[in-house]
Image (cartoon, rainbow, N blue to C red):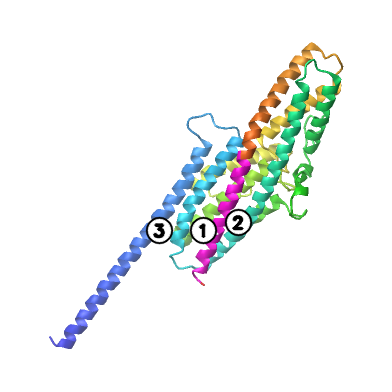
C-alpha cells in the first residue's frame, strides 16, 4: 500500500471515528433532554396531586388563606424546576417556533407581574375590612351591651358591608364590581385595566405543542409552566378583590390526558364552580372573606333591631357570632401578611425568570 493510500485511509478512519462520537454524543444529549422533560412533567404532576389530595387529610378549605399559600408553594416549586429546564434550553438551537413561544411567555410574565401588584393591593383592602370587623367585635363584646356600643358596631359593619356591596336586606348578598375598586385609588394602573382581561389575554395564545414539538426539550416545559402561571394568577384574581369587572370561569383548555394537566384541571374546575356558583364575578371569593361577610350581615341585622336592654336570648346568639368573627379576624391577621409576602416573592421570581428567558433568546442573536 502506498503512503498516500495509507494516509487517506487513516484520515477516513479518524473522520468516521469523530462522526461516530458526535452521533453518540447527540443521542446522549437528546436522551438527557427527554429525561429532563419527563422529570419536569412528573414534578408538576406530583406537586399538584399532593396539593389536591394532601396527606394526611383534612385539607384546607378551598380558597382559604392556607389553601392559597399552598398553591403558591406549588408554583414556586414548579418554577424552580423550570429554571433548570431553561439551562438546557440555552444550549440547544432556537427554532422559530421556540423563539415565538418564549417571546409570548415574556409577554405573559409581564401581565402576571401586573396581576401580582393588583393582588398585593387587593390584600390591603382585605386588611382594611378586617380592621372594620375588629371594631365591630370590640364594640359588641361590651357588657352590658348598650346603645352606644351597638351604634359603633353598626357604623363599622356598614363600612365593611358597603365595601363588598352586601346589602343587609338582600339575603343573596349579591356583589357588583365596586369591590374590585376598593384599592383603586392606591394603585397606579389605569382605570381601564382589568385583571380578568389580563388572564384572558395570557391564555389566548397558549397552545399545546403537537407532533415533534411535543417531544422536544423545551416547547412542552414552556407550555406547562405558562399554564401553571396562568392558573395560579387566575386563582389569585378569583380569591382576592382585584381591579376587574369579571373573572373568567375556566380560562385554560388543559390536556387532561396528561397527568400534570389532569391534576391542574381539578383545581380549575373546583375554583370555576365557585366563580360560577356565586354572583361574585369581580373576585373576592377568599373563604375567610365569605365568612366575614356572612357573619357581618347577621351582626348588622342585630344592630338594626337592637333595643336597650338587650333580650337575653338575642344577646347569647350574637355573642356566638361575635366570637366567630373574632376568630376569623385572628386567622386573617397573620394569614394575610404571610400571603402578601408570598405574592411579593412570586413577583420577584417572575422578574428573575423573565431575565433568564431574555438571556436564552439573546444567545441566538
Q: Are marks 3 and 1 in contact (CB under 8 Å)?
A: no
On screen, 335 above or below 146? below
- How much space separates mark 3 and mark 2, taking CA atoms? 25 Å
On screen, 221 above or below 361? above
Q: Magenta stretch containing residue 346, yes or no? A: yes
Q: Which residue is mark 3?
A: 33
- 310 vs 295, nearest the viewer: 310
Q: Position of residue 56 (x, y in %)?
A: 48, 30
Res 109 label: 2
Q: Which residues are magenta?
A: 338-364
Residues packed near mark 3 inside 10 Å, few (<14), some (14 to 19) or many (20 plus) = many
On screen, 41 above or below 51? below
Does any portion of residue 348 appear in the rendered image? yes
Res 209 label: 1
Does any portion of residue 217 appear in the rendered image? no
Residues packed near mark 2 inside 10 Å, few (<14), some (14 to 19) or many (20 plus) = many
Amino acid at each position: 500500500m502506498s503512503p498516500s493510500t495509507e494516509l487517506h485511509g487513516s484520515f477516513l478512519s479518524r473522520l468516521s471515528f469523530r462522526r461516530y462520537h458526535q452521533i453518540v454524543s447527540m443521542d446522549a444529549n437528546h436522551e438527557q433532554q427527554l429525561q429532563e422533560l419527563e422529570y419536569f412533567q412528573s414534578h408538576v404532576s406530583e406537586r399538584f396531586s399532593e396539593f389536591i389530595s394532601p396527606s394526611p387529610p383534612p385539607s384546607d378549605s378551598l380558597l382559604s388563606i392556607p389553601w392559597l399559600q399552598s398553591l403558591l408553594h406549588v408554583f414556586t416549586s414548579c418554577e424552580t424546576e423550570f429554571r433548570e429546564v431553561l439551562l438546557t434550553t440555552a444550549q440547544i438551537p432556537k427554532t422559530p417556533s421556540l423563539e415565538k413561544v418564549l417571546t409570548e411567555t415574556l409577554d405573559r410574565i409581564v401581565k402576571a407581574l401586573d396581576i401580582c401588584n393588583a393582588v398585593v393591593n387587593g390584600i390591603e383592602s382585605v386588611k382594611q375590612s378586617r380592621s372594620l370587623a375588629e371594631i365591630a367585635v370590640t364594640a359588641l363584646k361590651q357588657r352590658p351591651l348598650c346603645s352606644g356600643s351597638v351604634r359603633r358596631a353598626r357604623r363599622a359593619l356598614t363600612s365593611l358591608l358597603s365595601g363588598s356591596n352586601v346589602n343587609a336586606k338582600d339575603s343573596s348578598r349579591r356583589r357588583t364590581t365596586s369591590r374590585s375598586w376598593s384599592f383603586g385609588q392606591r394603585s397606579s394602573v389605569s382605570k381601564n385595566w382589568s385583571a380578568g382581561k389580563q388572564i384572558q389575554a395570557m391564555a389566548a395564545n397558549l397552545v399545546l405543542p403537537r407532533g415533534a414539538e411535543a417531544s422536544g426539550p423545551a416547547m412542552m416545559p414552556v407550555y406547562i409552566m405558562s399554564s401553571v402561571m396562568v392558573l395560579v394568577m387566575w386563582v389569585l384574581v378569583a380569591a382576592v378583590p382585584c381591579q376587574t369587572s369579571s373573572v373568567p370561569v375556566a380560562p385554560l383548555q388543559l390536556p387532561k390526558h396528561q397527568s400534570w394537566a389532569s391534576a391542574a384541571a381539578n383545581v380549575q374546575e373546583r375554583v370555576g364552580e365557585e366563580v360560577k356558583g356565586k354572583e361574585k364575578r369581580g373576585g373576592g371569593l377568599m373563604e375567610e372573606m365569605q365568612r366575614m361577610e356572612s357573619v357581618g350581615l347577621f351582626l348588622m341585622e342585630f344592630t338594626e333591631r337592637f333595643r336597650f336592654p338587650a333580650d337575653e336570648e338575642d344577646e347569647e346568639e350574637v355573642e356566638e357570632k361575635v366570637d366567630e368573627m373574632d376568630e376569623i379576624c385572628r386567622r386573617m391577621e397573620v394569614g394575610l401578611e404571610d400571603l402578601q409576602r408570598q405574592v411579593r416573592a412570586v413577583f420577584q421570581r417572575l422578574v428573575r425568570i423573565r431575565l433568564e428567558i431574555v438571556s436564552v433568546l439573546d444567545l441566538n442573536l
